[in-house]
Image: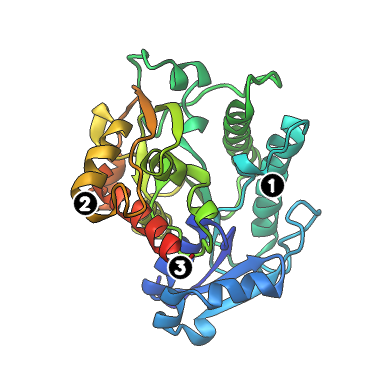
Amino acid sequence: MAGETIFVTGGTGHLGYQVILKALEAGYTVRAAVRSQSKANKILSAPSIKALNPGNRLQFATVEDMLTDGAYNEAIKGAIYAIHVASPITYAYKEGDDYDEVFKIPALKGTMNLLEAAQQSSTIKRVVITSSIVAIIPWSDFISGTSSTIYNENSRTPTPSAHYANVFEAYSASKVAALNETEKWVDEKKPAFDVAHIYPAFIIGADELASTVEEALAGTNAQVTGPASGKDMGPAPGASIHVEDVARAHVKALDPALPPNQGYVLASMGLEGTRWEDVFEIVRREFPDKVGSGGLRNDGAIATLAVKIDERSSEERLGWGFKGYEEQVKSAVGGYLALARRG
C-alpha cells in the first residue's frame, strides 16, 4: 500500500529505473540497491525523478556485489515488499566467457540471496521477481517460428543442460533455471511471504538513463532502434511489450487485493504478436522529417518469427490493456533521436 517501503534491485537498468519511478508515482517509499554512490547519483539526476522530487521517499542501500552471501540481508531490513529486477543481461557476455558463469550462476545466486534475505526479514509480505517469457517457453519453440503451442503464465519448461548454441540461448536458460529453482525453494521453505513472477516479452521503450546513442542501440530496444538506424537485426520472435507496462505491472503485483503467488505474462498484440517489420512504416509515419537526412536511415532489416503468447488473463488481473507496438516504437525511437540530437 502507498507509503510502505519497497526494496528494489537493478534500479539503474532500463526496466529497474522505470520500476522505481512507477513505485514513487504510486506513493510508495523506495529503497534501491546500488553498487556505488555514483549509481545513486545517476538515478537522482534523471529528469523524471527530479520532477517528482521524492525527498526521503527515495533511499539507497549500497550492495557492491549481489552474489556475495547475505548480500541483501541488511539492505532489505524494514521493507514491506521487494522487487528483484537485477539479473545478467546478454551484452554482459564477452567472447570466450563461460556461459553459465555469466548467466546461470549469477541469476540463481542473486535470486536466492534476495529470497533468503526476505526470509530473514520479519517484515516482507511479497516479493516480485522479473522473469521473462523465455523462462516459460522451450527455446526450440521460441525460435522456430512454426510452433502452434499457446503459452501463458502457467506454462513451464525443464531447465536445459549447459549446451548452448549462442548467448541468447544461455540467457534464456538462466531465466528458466531461476524460475524453476525459485518455485522449488518456495515449495520447500514455505516462507511467510508470497512470490509473484513477471514474464515480459522483449521490453521496448525509451531508456531515460541512457546517455549515449550507443546505449539506445543496445539491449532489447535494438529490435526497434537497430532497423530504424539501418542495422540488420536478423529474425526474432514476435513478442514485445512497452517498458512502462512492465514497470507498472511490477508495482501493481504488490497489491494485496491480488491473490498470492501469481504470474503475469506481458506481451502486446494478442496471439498474432508483434510484427517487427512494421517499425519502418511506423517510423515513416511518426518521424517523417527524421527519415533520410534527418538522422534515421530506416532501411535496416528484421524478420518476425511467430510465437503465440496469451496475455489476456494477465491484462484482466492487472486491470489495463497493454500499449501496442506503435507506442513502443515511438518511445524507443524518440529516445534514440533525443540522444542523437544531444550528440
Apparent side of residue 60 relative to residue 278 in the rendered image (left or right) = right
The residue positioned 32% from the left and 51% from the top of the image is 293
The structure residue drawn at horizontal position 36% and vertical position 25%, both measured from the top left corner, is 303
Q: For residue 227, what is the image quadrant?
A: top left
Mark 2 / mark 1, whichever is N-terminal: 1
**Tag 2: residue type?**
Pro
Q: Earlier in the sequence, mark 3 or mark 2?
A: 2
Residue at the (29%, 54%) spot, across then down: 290
Is there CB contact under 8 Å for labels 3 and 2?
A: no
Earlier-in-chain disc, 1 versus 3 = 1
Identify residue type, mark 1: Met
Residue 35 is situated, as x and y percent measured from the top left of the image, at 71, 65
> Is disc 3 placed on a helix, strand or loop?
helix
Give the residue pinned by disc 3.
342
Q: Which mark is residue 59?
A: none
x and y percentages locating residue 120 in the rendered image? 70, 60
From the image, tell me which residue sits under label 2: 288
Disc 1 from disc 3: Cα separation: 41 Å
Looking at the rendered structure, which numbered label has been put on residue 112?
Answer: 1
Q: Quadrant of residue 117?
A: bottom right
